[in-house]
Image (cartoon, helix red, strand yellow):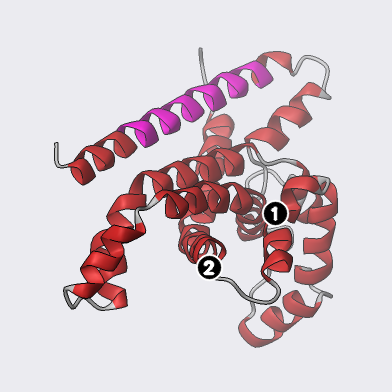
Amino acid sequence: MSVSAAEIAIVGLSLKVALVATFFSLPVAVGVAWILARKEFFGKSVLNIAVHLPLVLPPVVTGYALLLLFGKQGVIGGALEAAFGVTLAFKWTGAALAAAIMGFPLMVRAIRLGFETVDKGLEDAAATLGASKRAVFRHVTLPLITPAILAGAALGFAKAMGEFGATITFVASIPGETETLPSAIYTLLQVPGGETAALRLIALSIVISIAALAVSEALARRAAKRVLGR
């Protein structure tokens, strides 16, 4: 299978978008998952709905909402451009933002389950021995939920790699700038004779997805063995 320079560039951009989206959304997902799993407060159900809304809304709706908010004429996008000269709409950074938002609910769900399965007795025991809340979280809770965090990261990365609807609505499909694997495959399938190139990109996306899942599974097993002391 001969892969062209343009196809390599598409794969590279897709990986960059997915990695940036996962890297920046993962810490936020951990914090939100902890709040939803451990805290009771007025408006918790509203926060839960807001977090999971991208899962149930049509991706095009999410992309249009991003365009309204982060476009050059949007409230946030206009402020970012005026203050810092940052433009997200129709840029690869906007693609990363769209991918992060679409993958965020999956990350939160996986990590929240991790928090909910932690034996609170272990945390209480550490606290009675004089450990601060921060120390308990760092040395007890965090190691126990590491497999869940890795699972959430893998889901977020996979969703970012495959995101199409919100991304193409917010940043379009500009070759060399915002053309990721899903948008490139879609474009090729609309062109007569583009099936061969589309199949190459599909094969590459399958290989990348399998590799990402395999790495995530290996890391999760290693983390679990470390927690169990094996």
Q: Amino acid at mark 1?
A: His
Would you say 191 lies left or right of 101 here?
Answer: right
Residue shown at 18%/78% (left/top)? 130
- Does 132 sit above or below residue 56? below
Query: Which mark, residue 35?
Result: 2
Q: Secondary structure at mark 2?
A: helix
Image mark count: 2
Would you say 106 lies left or right of 213 here?
Answer: right
Q: Quadrant of residue 215?
A: top left
Asked whether residue 111 appears in the rendered view, the answer is: yes
- Does 3 sit above or below residue 136? above
Check disc 1 and report the residue beneath it. Answer: 52
Extreme residue toward the bottom, this view: 83
The range drawn in magenta is: 198-218
Q: Judge whether residue 201 is colored magenta.
A: yes
Q: Are marks 2 and 1 in contact (CB under 8 Å)?
A: no
Asked whether residue 13 appears in the rendered view, the answer is: no
Residue 105 position, x and y percent, is 63, 52
Crowd around label 1: few <14 · some 14–19 · many ≥20 (10 Å): some
First of labels 2, 1 by sequence position: 2
Residue 156 position, x and y percent, is 54, 46
Residue shown at 64%/79% (left/top)? 85
Looking at the picture, tell me which residue is in the foreground, 176 or 169.
169
Crowd around label 2: few <14 · some 14–19 · many ≥20 (10 Å): some
Looking at the picture, tell me which residue is in the foreground, 149 or 6.
149
Question: Which label sits in the foreground, 2 or 1?
Answer: 2
Quadrant of the drawing holding the C terminus: top left
Q: Secondary structure at mark 1?
A: helix
